[in-house]
Image (spheres, rainbow, N blue to C red):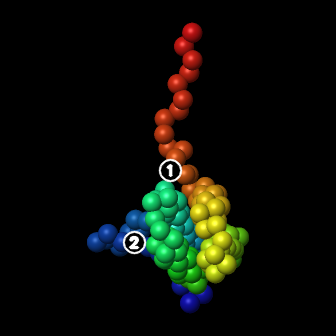
Amino acid sequence: MEYLLKKPIHMIDSSPHQIMNMEFRCFLLNENKANLAQRVADILSAVQDLNDTSSNMGTRHLVSNSQTIVNQIRRVIHTHWPQSEEPNLLTLQRCGVAIMKTIDEKGDLVKILKSCQQHLARISGKNEAPINDLGTAEPENQN
């Protein structure tokens, strides 16, 4: 297995010459980072949607949707990730624990969800450019 990770991949197009040479290890590391960023973005959008619609929901429905988000967080945490992603995974774990603890203690779930949204946005901002920052620049004052 170690031999396969160090050997470059050669993609050949119907002729014996080399078209592309890519280090497999670098490819896997970049793919893992992009995959984690995508999963965090999915969880973030679910939390944002829940925060937006929480005023129109009953307590039971809010708790049910919050538990669904915690299950998504669990799936992400229990997947194998590189050691470099551990701080992001710890933040995800803290968000999941805070949500479940608030549900068990019947605390202010909306407040915790807003806090988790901020932490998830911070993780998403570290891994990639936030979607909110893709807008146009502010126009200059014309005097």
Q: Amino acid at mark 2?
A: Met
In the rendered image, which quarter contains the N terminus? bottom right
Q: Please count the marks in the image.
A: 2
Q: Is residue 98 visible?
A: yes
Marks 1 and 2, how far apart at CA: 34 Å
Nearer the observer, 10 or 123:
123
Helix, strand or loop at label 1? It is helix
The residue identified by callout 1 is: 131
Nearer the observer, 137 or 30:
137
In the rendered image, which quarter contains the C terminus? top right
Sooner in the amino-acid sequence: mark 1 or mark 2: 2
Q: Where does residue 138 sit, x and y in percent of width and height?
A: 54, 29
Q: Is residue 82 visible?
A: no
Residue at x 49%, y 75% (from the top left corner): 60
Above or below 18: residue 97: below
Q: Is residue 76 left or right of residue 85?
A: left
Instruction: Tell me which corner region of the image, top left, top right, bottom left or bottom right, holds residue 108.
Output: bottom right
Q: Amino acid at mark 1?
A: Ile
Q: Is residue 42 left or right of residue 111?
A: left
Report the residue that reaches farthest toward the left. 14
Instruction: Tell me which corner region of the image, top left, top right, bottom left or bottom right, holds residue 40.
Output: bottom right
Q: Where does residue 125 sit, x and y in percent of width and height?
A: 61, 55
Above or below 133: residue 116: below
The residue identified by callout 2 is: 11
Instruction: Tell me which corner region of the image, top left, top right, bottom left or bottom right, holds residue 86.
Output: bottom right
Q: Where does residue 132 sit, x and y in percent of width and height?
A: 52, 47
Q: Is residue 57 left or right of residue 116?
A: left
Above or below 8: residue 3: below
